[in-house]
Image: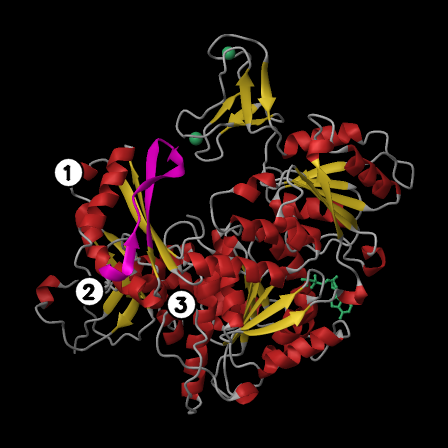
Amino acid sequence: MAFWPSIVVATPAHSGVGATLTYRSELSLAPGGLVRVPLGSREVLGVVWDCPDAPPEGLTEARTKAVAGVLDGLPPLNACWRQLVKFSAQYYQRSLGEVALAALPPQLRELDSTQLARRLKKRAKVGTAGPATPGELNGHDLSDEQAEALQALAAASAPVLLFGATGSGKTEVYLRATQAVLETPVSDGESPTQVLVMVPEINLTPQLEARFRERFEPGFGAGSVVCLHSGMTPAQRLSSWLAAHTGSARIVLGTRMAIFASLPGLRLIVVDEEHDPSYKSQEGARYSARDLAVYRAKVESEALLAASGRSWHTGPHPNPLPEGEGTEAGEGMNAPRCQVLLGSATPSLESWHAADQGRYVRLAMPGRIGGGMLPRLRLVDMNHQPKGAMLAPPLLAAMSERIERGEQCLVLLNRRGYAPVLACHDCGWKSGCPHCSAYRVFHKLDRTLRCHHCGFTERVPRACPDCGNLDIAPVGRGTEQVEEQLASLLADVKRPDGSPARVARMDADSTRLKGSLEVQLAALHSGEVDVLVGTQMIAKGHDFRRITLVAGINADSALFASDYRAPERLFALLMQAAGRAGRDAEQSGASEMWIQTWYPQHPLFATLKKHDYPAFAAEQLSEREQAGMPPYGFQALLRADARTQQAAQAFLNIAAGQAAGLPHRDDITLYPAVPLTIQRVANVERAQMLVETHSRGALQRFLSAWQPVLHGCRSAPEARGLVRWAVDVDPLSI
Ligand code: ADP
Ligand code: ZN
Ligand code: ZN
């Protein structure tokens, strides 16, 4: 007997959503199984999607190729995983094959079944160490707020938004919720329960990993906690993935890509710092891992409930994505389910709005652990400071005082390198990038000019390339320069032991080498460093114990940015940054957040001063509602890259013209094609068109119908020179 499995393989981005290829097989293959199949002249990894015993109409045996091999050492990817992949492809307008294969560890593509069997055997030896000292799970005594939050979480039957101040102890809530899941008994043959914990950035994983290992490895064995992020080697990623897929890992900690991990026993997804833009992918399928977490939890819950033979009742929709009929786990804490817990001190307006509407359960932990206070906001009016001062004298004095007391300071600015531009004051030459419409950044340490968009790097010229003037000078400031100047400004300041103050820097440049991040964080934690200068990387998530002063020295540009999300982002960043100060309750009373600004009267600062996120959110949401912006309206971007700006815009305009008559066209506004703010990157011209509507369903159906049209527009003569195009659903910046 022959079977005709439909197989998903890595296909180009736009080969059609839902496309699978039909092969032949002597054996019946389980959906979700991994196979190797011929494709063109190569043999590639594929995922079995379906396995009918009759060929699809019109297909003959002679025209079908046989499956080349089956990776039968692995259990199949389960139905929930496949549903997640399918939904992601549809929702974000990409091909099923692209999403499915990108969701698997890259190294899996290279293994045949013998090699895989060897890997699995090696894993089996190390993986199943079993509980060392069962039941030895200790933690802090819970604060009242933590205890209440955990009770409410256990009773919640919708996604939970944990609105917890910085330093309120959200991590302990994650740890306890995880513990409850891991201790849930499962019946014979069921996968052991699992938890997925996501963080926005790789640099936050070491601290969290340490806390989870310390808490759970004694009870659940070495190997019960694994990480999954792009900073790992392909071999490490494969190993973590296999551990999760086979159930030997009980906890997966990772960045956004971890949302696609295969987790057969998934019962809880934690999204820490859920507001963070890093959860949205900016390439390939431009998915939001936060939104997919909510969707995945719903799918997993439905499957668990179906398996347990209970039924659903209809209720408010827990899923932020599709509109329409909704279901909700109705039986409270006893129903088998997968929960989703979104945590933040500054939730995204989308999640805040969902909680306002009752679609999410909002739990608040307003107090800091130990009764500590949030730092006092001090605004420095730069209009009244000496001209050209990088740090206002009162700020410098405050920092010196802290250092003398043995406390630490953080200095934040959002620009790495020494200076954003190098310029000649004689002829006006500037260090532009020849390939981009942007300046190259001056890096003094290695004396280079580097483009932060395309990577183009050259040695700094000795003289002006245009007029030969020897006196070319940096304009503006980056982290390197602030580090250098602070070191000299603080040269005479002594620490309590009499040694000179120490300044260090942490940004994408200083943490490029593997392991350097950990070393730098350790230096701060141990008190070797007094002042840390850095980009937003240092503002997020870290539990620094001795920092009592945080300074934001150039926040102004974001006050007047054109992007409507800029205020939300700035508010979150400053509030997060402030949250790094005074985390030790005893020192919190004297902790301060300093902001240097030319616009101290700006209303954003007044709200920030009160640490009043709810007031800020309410005001932003009402503005958004009036303007029909997300979360009240729905958006997508059609992006085009081409050799010329004209071709890029032509593609967009043709696509808009040919949208006439498509379903829901009347509900959709297509804005004029415009160049991106940074119009040219790596010699490619970039343009985009905003797609906007009041209904998510309309947007989805319109975009699906538009896909084939977009394919066709590629070959229009006016669009000659088009390099690529993409749809970005729910874009984060427009
Ligand atoms: P958040 O993530 O909410 O900013 P953390 O989870 O990092 O805060 O917690 C802040 C600090 O408080 C950490 O050092 C943590 O160990 C400590 N902590 C958390 N819960 C408790 C508790 N119940 N008792 C004592 N200390 C706690
Ligand atoms: Zn010159
Ligand atoms: Zn460039």
Q: Residue furthest top?
A: 468
Whether residues under marks 1 and 2 lie with C-beta atoms below 8 angstroms apart, the answer is: no
Left or right position of 611 against 308 = right
Which residue, given by chain and number where applicable, does mark 3 sit on? Answer: 321
- The answer to whether any part of residue 321 appears in the image is yes
Task: Decide: few, some or many residues near mark 3? Use Cα within 10 Å; few <14, some 14-19, many ≥20.
Answer: some
- The answer to whether any part of residue 45 appears in the image is no
Query: Does the magenta portion include 488?
Result: no
Of labels 3 and 2, earlier in sequence is: 2
Is 607 rendered above or below residue 266?
A: above
The quadrant where residue 217 appears: bottom right
Question: x and y percent of residue 118 in the render?
Answer: 44, 63
Of labels 3 and 1, earlier in sequence is: 3
Which residue, given by chain and number where applicable, does mark 1 sit on? Answer: 717
Q: Type of residue at label 2?
A: Ala
Measure the C-alpha gap from mark 3 to mark 2: 38 Å
Which residue, given by chain and number where applicable, does mark 2 sit on? Answer: 66
Q: Main secondary structure of the magenta part?
A: strand
Query: Element type at marker 1?
Result: helix
Q: Residue at x 67, y 48 (%)?
A: 518
Q: Type of residue at label 3?
A: Leu
Magenta highlight range: 665-691
Task: Decide: few, some or many residues near mark 2? Use Cα within 10 Å; few <14, some 14-19, many ≥20.
Answer: some
Question: Mark 3 against mark 2, which lies toward the viewer?
Answer: 3
Whether residues under marks 3 and 2 lie with C-beta atoms below 8 angstroms apart, the answer is: no
Left or right position of 265 against 11 = right
Measure the C-alpha gap from mark 1 to mark 2: 40 Å
Q: Residue at x 87, y 39 (%)?
A: 495
Question: x and y percent of residue 645 in the render?
Answer: 29, 34
